[in-house]
Amino acid sequence: MGPLSYFLGIQAQLLPTGLFLNQQRYATYLLQAAGMLDCAPMPTPLPLQLDRVPNQDEYFSNPTYFCSLAGKLQYLTLTRPDIQFAVNVVCQKMHKPTVADFHLLKRVLRYVKGTLEMGLTLESDTNSQVRAYCDNDWAGCHDTRRSTGGFCTFMGTNLISWSAKRRLSITVLY
């Protein structure tokens, strides 16, 4: 079969120091599906103040299209931990997306357009020390008071696991 080069939408490039994984072809397909191949890139996946995005009360007219693009973005996070949090924010709105949510989704896609070549490097010559980092926003959702938390795990210099998701709220009775 030959050396690994492409598998399930993930491109693999063997390097002298390890392996580079990215999804440039898949990201290009995603931009094409969204009709955004020629869009202007954005420097960040989300704005600094999410609560100040306009049109938060107007529902998006095609929620199926929104869900389709959001799901495709989720698959892109396999090799793109830099968009994990932004995609999580967008996917939390899949049940009743607003026009503002669609603008956030398009902003993530515009960020992807400017960072098509980004991916994950796995180095073969690294130690086996395991390190993990985590963070929470502690009741960051103004409506539900639920927290969004995330973590990343490294083995040596290699990022091996990451996640961002909304946590269940816990009621404490005194």
Image: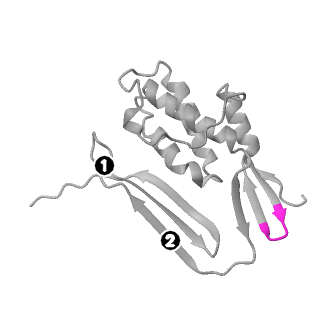
For the C terminus, which image quadrant? bottom left
Secondary structure, mark 2, is: strand
How many C-alpha atoms fall within 10 Å of the one at disc 1: few (<14), some, or many (≥20)? some
Quadrant of the image occupied by residue 5: bottom right
In the rendering, at what x and y percent does residue 35 appear?
67, 25
Left or right relative to 16: residue 74: left
Q: Please, which colouring scheme is shown?
A: one colour
In the rendering, at what x and y percent does residue 163 appear?
50, 57
Left or right relative to 96: residue 110: right
* Residue at the image position 28 percent from the left and 42 percent from the top: 142
Please identify the dominant SS of the magenta region. strand
Count of numbered marks = 2
* Residue at the image position 63 percent from the left and 52 percent from the top: 80
Q: Which residue is mark 2?
A: 132
Q: Is residue 72 visible?
A: no
Quadrant of the image occupied by residue 150: bottom left
Amino acid type at mark 1 = Arg
In the rendering, at what x and y percent does residue 111 appear?
62, 40
**Magenta part of the chain:** 14-18
As drawn, 97 above or below 9: above
| Of the image marks 1 and 2, the number of the one nearer the N terminus | 2
How many C-alpha atoms fall within 10 Å of the one at disc 2: few (<14), some, or many (≥20)? few
In the rendering, at what x and y percent does residue 46 appear?
51, 41
Q: Which residue is mark 1?
A: 146
* Residue at the image position 72 percent from the left and 29 percent from the top: 37
Amino acid type at mark 2 = Ala
Depth check: give the residue in front, 71 or 147.
147
Left or right relative to 9: residue 66: left
Q: Give the CA distance from mark 1 to mark 2.
A: 23 Å
